[in-house]
Amino acid sequence: MAKPVKPVKYTAALEASAEAAGWHFITVSREIGERFQTDGRTRRVVCTLNGKLSIQCALMPSGGNFFILVSKKVRSAVGISAGDMVKLSLIPDTSKYGFPMPEEFAEVLAQDADGDKLFHALTPGKQRSLIFTVASGKDIDRRIHRALIILEHLKDNDGKIDNKKLYHELQRPLL
């Protein structure tokens, strides 16, 4: 049995980017960031903020250190704003996709072998992006609708994603 991973805990300030309006982030030192494995591109972790909320995220490299992006939704849920000190707990993200797979998308993939093959041929980052698109549907019908449109898009475009075209396809009314 695998030995449980001890979380890396530390406190850091939530910062707002001067260059990118609205972007908020927490810096992770090189020493801490390099404790986590990389697949050659990213280092995926589960970050718990102030013991209140856990998010799956990437340690993004920047100037020798790393950073974690913190969305407005997450900041609101945790009750933090720029300048606040935040207690972090980081563990490796060992999940299959680095983001929770919606049940509806998993079921659509299970019922469509060709679509499943095309989806799993995508890079992990593109998979996460499509999973996020489905998961952001506000109800079960929208999530199923989005999952079906995404697989149809992949099949119609030889497994490639045309973001502009997909965006317009996702605007179609629910069936």
Image (cartoon, rainbow, N blue to C red):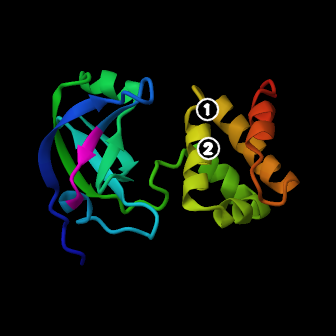
| Residue 22 % position (x, y) | 42, 24
Q: Are marks 2 and 1 in contact (CB under 8 Å)?
A: yes
Q: Could you tell me which residue is drawn at 83 percent across and 55 percent down? A: 155
Q: Amino acid at mark 2?
A: Glu
Q: Residues within 10 Å of mark 1 (few under 14, many from 20)?
A: some
Image check: 90 left or right of 74? left
Which residue position is annotated with label 1? 140
Q: Nearer the viewer, residue 18 or 36?
A: 18
- Residue nearer the viewer, 3 or 23: 23
Give the residue at x 25% y 44%. Answer: 27
Q: Name the dominant secondary structure of the magenta segment.
A: strand
When the figure is inspected, residue 40 is found, relative to residue 103, above or below; the finding is below
Q: Nearer the viewer, residue 171 or 137?
A: 171
* Quadrant the C terminus occupies: top right
Q: What is the quadrant of the N terminus in the image?
A: bottom left
Q: Is residue 131 above or below residue 40?
A: above
Question: Residue, x 46% and y 49% (percent of image)?
Answer: 99
Left or right of 84? Residue 39 is right
The residue tagged 2 is 104
2 versus 52 height, above or below: below
Tag 1: amino acid: Ile
